[in-house]
Image (cartoon, coloured by chain):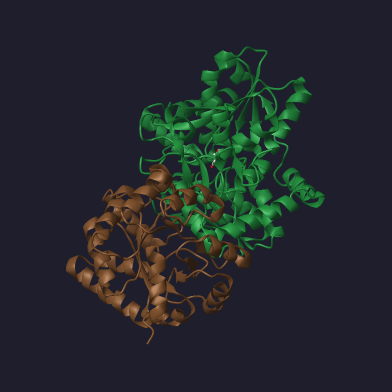
Chain colours: A brown, B green
Amino acid sequence: MPRIDRVFKQLKAKGEKALIPFITAGDPDLATTRALALEMAARGADILELGVPFSDPLADGPTIQAASLRAMQGGVHLENVLNLAGELRAQTQIPLILMGYYNPILQYGLERTATEAAANGVDGFIIPDLPPEEAGPWRVAAAKAKIATIFLAAPTSGAERIRTLGRLTKGFLYYVSVTGITGARTELPLDLVESLKEVRSLVKCPLAVGFGISTPEQVAGLAPYVDGVVVGSAIVQRVARLRGQELIQEVGDFIAALKAPLRGN
Amino acid sequence: MLPDRHGRYGRYGGRFVPETLMPALLELEEAYRTIHRTGEFRQELAWYLKDYVGRPTPLYFARHLSAELGGPQIYIKREDLAHTGAHKINNTLGQGLLARRMGKTRLIAETGAGQHGVATATVAALLGLSCDIYMGTEDIRRQRLNVIRMNLLGAKVVPVESGSRTLKDAMNEAIRDWVTNVRHTHYVLGSVGGPHPYPMIVRDFQAVIGREARGQLRRRTGKLPQCLVACVGGGSNAMGLFHAFRDEAVRFVGVEAAGHGVDTHHHSATLVAGSVGVLHGAFSYLLQDPWGNIQEAHSLAPGLDYPGVGPEHAWFKDQGRAEYVAVTDTEALEGFNLLSRTEGILPALESAHAIAYLRRLAPEYTADDIVIVNLSGRGDKDVDAVAEAMEVSGAAH
Ligand SMILES: Cc1ncc(COP(=O)(O)O)c(C=O)c1O
């Protein structure tokens, strides 16, 4: 069974929900990303999402844009991120998902990306500018390499598209909590819980929610309605602010705090 | 006729956008397909184009320019005489009327030269819609006059600080705004680029340029032209001129900006010197590094300073239906001077690229031949930049 599926199955058996933290690979450098990833895995993360730096991240807010820029200034690109995944895989069995825009993947080669990703222990890809209408060639390459293509669903999608997305996605369906770009928010949409209940009724696959989620309180409020919660910008803000051991410690503590409400009782 | 139902021109085009926008693009396509053919919409658009924009724009026989270059008869399609001073209004008016019928209350747009921003702000004022325009701070500096115009028209100009602070970055920010406010906002994309259905919609609204020119030339000479020439940024004024001639044996030449030269890293010659990939929702030619990161473009003409190009042009290039060439900043300045001195018309720096190429093209033709060049905009917005550039190059008199 693929690693992502196994994690959701095991968590379900324990009555737990998945914590899926996101950081941009190479922000501020690859060694820090490696240390952070291992710390997060040790402190309660269930699945890791690593961002592939890109010059024009148009689904991202200022926090992740800045992270992408910092990583690019260090010369980090897809190949480095694949190698980093390989290093992590040698040390942990946590599922690894790469989140990257389509053009760098296209230029590296769809088949080459998928095969090398698989060889380096990557489990899935989230490609935010690749809706199902355009995803055919990538899905073929990914399926051949046994890499999951994880689709996003949005508040604007409507029931029909959500059903389709739920059928096509592998691993889980990633529901975007807000009509908007990434970025930590103090308040989530008032109707988010209602939306999650509706999505839940439309799809059979595991459901994760992300975009804007930044506190353990928000995580606690959403946990009953989903199988997983993605937290990105709130972690990336800490990466931007802190360095060295202080950063690792702070992110580790934050992960532990975010995971607590997902452990059930 | 292309695009196919997936929004493809051959392998180019498509809709590479976040899921949040997919329903909006489908809604826009549906609305466009049902509304734009209705008699009511066509009459409304035609009325505004005539009484508000001042169409048809003249097709002017440039006797002195033709004599100076010593080749073909050169006709100039005077989009510079359209309201707001460029072809951009043809598209913003069409999209504005469409947006109003779709019940949208707010327009947003990206702008480089500021011409598309001004044209969008104008239509927003006309139709009573609120309006935000994204513009890179480098372009705000270069095109101050247009910033003032947009403000006077009641639009808010939102400065964009990221990347090269030019058109590409303004477009990123406009897309981010649209992702956030898509329910009540219409994104007025300014060229034949971006995700389907924009390349089709913008082409169709700009096609009035070529339809008019074709009729005007036929009435005057009874002939078709041998060749059409237009500058290419995203490609809307060029596609607007070409479209009505697509099934005729007429040569199409698109002129890109070579900036400091296509063999430097400072140019915007996407079709001449770029490679294929995905930018801003479409598969087309673009300027990128080996890792697929988008490279910064350069041109003295802010409206050409963009590392992408519309997918139908990419298709035309591969099919050999159109040729794409590039002229440098310096040549464009010569083109600017040439038209100013011979015909008393100050061209926009963008259009000056098309004018400049006539010098290279003219020797291929004789006085029996006809070339139409699209004068996509007027040069008032550029006089500061031109004066500055000529001082630097020592060309000022
Ligand atoms: C006068 C003028 N011409 C040409 C362009 C380039 O755009 P396109 O290639 O879409 O016509 C611009 C863009 O701002 C412009 O203002």
Q: Residue at x 76, y 24 (%)?
A: B218
User: Where residue B270 sits: x, y (%)?
Assistant: 47, 35
Question: Which residue sits furthest left?
Answer: A245
Q: Residue at x 72, y 47 (%)?
A: B52
Q: Residue at x 29, y 65 (%)?
A: A93
User: Where residue B186 sits: x, y (%)?
Assistant: 61, 58
Between B307 and A17, the one lying in front of the other is A17
Question: Count of labels shown?
Answer: 0
Q: Residue at x 45, y 41 (%)?
A: B307
User: Where residue B277 sits: x, y (%)?
Assistant: 46, 42
Instruction: Name the quadrant where ligand 1 sits.
Output: top right
- Residue B294 in sight from this viewpoint: no
Q: The N terminus of chain A appears in which quarter of the rendering?
A: bottom left
Above-or-below relation of B307 to B338: below
Between B189 and A80, the one lying in front of the other is A80
A5 lies left or right of B197:
left
- Residue A129 in sight from this viewpoint: yes
User: Where residue A72 sits: x, y (%)?
Assistant: 31, 51
B145 lies left or right of A76:
right
Q: The C terminus of chain A appears in which quarter of the rendering?
A: bottom left
Above-or-below relation of A2 to B212: below
Q: Locate residue B344: give its quadrant.
A: top right
Above-or-below relation of A8 to B69: below
Question: Which residue sits furthest bottom?
Answer: A265
